[in-house]
Amino acid sequence: MSGKDLDKFTSEALRGQKRGIYEHSQCSLIMKGVQTENKLTKIFSICEGALLSENKDKLDLEKVKVCSDVCMSFQSTYPTKFDGTEYMNVAWIFSPTEENYHKYIKPWHKISLRYYPLLTTYRQAKYPRSRKLVQVSSWDQIEHHNKIVEYQEQVIKKIEDDLTECPEDFRFFVKTSALSVHSFNVLQGEFTAWALSELSDTRRELTKEISPKIWRDFTGQEKEKEEEDLE
């Protein structure tokens, strides 16, 4: 074998090895999404595969980025407690602007949300809690408690009235800074249902990049049957 032939053989072998590693990586991401019950993980595995793809020109990468960023925001959100109340301050990884609302939220969000006005970032900015400690006798505790409740009710009404006059995007980001746990789950459910539907074509394109042999070696099943199982 001449030096030129050896170089060609080595180059083709390396390309084949690299191709095999790529296809195995895509198989791993696709199967990760298939095998998990966690819908956020399903979505993120498709997004990872799209960003890894060698055929990005065939994919809607703008939609992939939207799905990936919203998915990461939900994955980064954990319950917070204040005075015994558990709520969710959604950790959006993008700025709460009108442009981002229409890009990331508007396409899929439809359902009204329950939130805690007293725990919102808006309340903290516009109606901050008093830091003054008030000492009262045991005889005055009930009256003092009633005054606090009355004040809180007034603040809640002010916040709700304020938000009525605010743009849709502003209201949304205020509410998602103090969602009830149930509303957070509803919001996440809205998104995952939309994203999985929107990314179905992306997943099919990624599956096409994998040869039947690599698919069979990786999954132990014929590719055509496995593609049906993905639906």
Image (tube, rainbow, N blue to C red):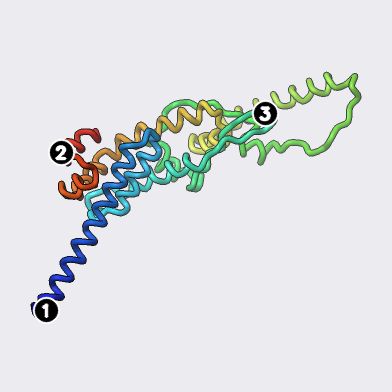
Disc 2 marks which residue?
Answer: 224
Q: Quadrant of the N terminus?
A: bottom left
Q: Relative to the observer, which residue lies in front, 115 or 21?
A: 21
Q: Verify CB contact (< 8 Å) between mark 1 and mark 2.
A: no
- Asked if one can make out residue 174 in the rendered structure from this viewpoint, the answer is no
**Coordinates of residue 184 in the picture (x, y in percent):** 50, 31
Q: Nearer the viewer, mark 3 or mark 1?
A: 1
**Coordinates of residue 110 in the picture (x, y in percent):** 41, 28
- Return the residue found at the far bottom: 3
Q: Relative to the observer, which residue lies in front, 193 or 228?
A: 228
Q: Amino acid at mark 3?
A: Gly
Q: Relative to the observer, which residue lies in front, 198 or 213?
A: 213
Q: Verify CB contact (< 8 Å) between mark 3 and mark 1.
A: no
Q: Quadrant of the C terminus?
A: top left
Badge 2 or badge 3: first in the primary sequence: 3
Where 157 sits versus 95, above or below? above
Disc 1 marks which residue?
Answer: 4
Q: Amino acid at mark 2?
A: Glu
Disc 3 marks which residue?
Answer: 84
Q: Amino acid at mark 1?
A: Lys
Where 121 sits versus 21, above or below? above
In the shown orientation, is residue 1 left or right of residue 185?
left
Describe the element under mark 2 as helix, strand or loop.
helix
Q: Nearer the viewer, mark 2 or mark 3?
A: 2
- Asked if one can make out residue 171 in the rendered structure from this viewpoint, the answer is yes
**Coordinates of residue 98 in the picture (x, y in percent):** 47, 43
Badge 3 or badge 1: first in the primary sequence: 1
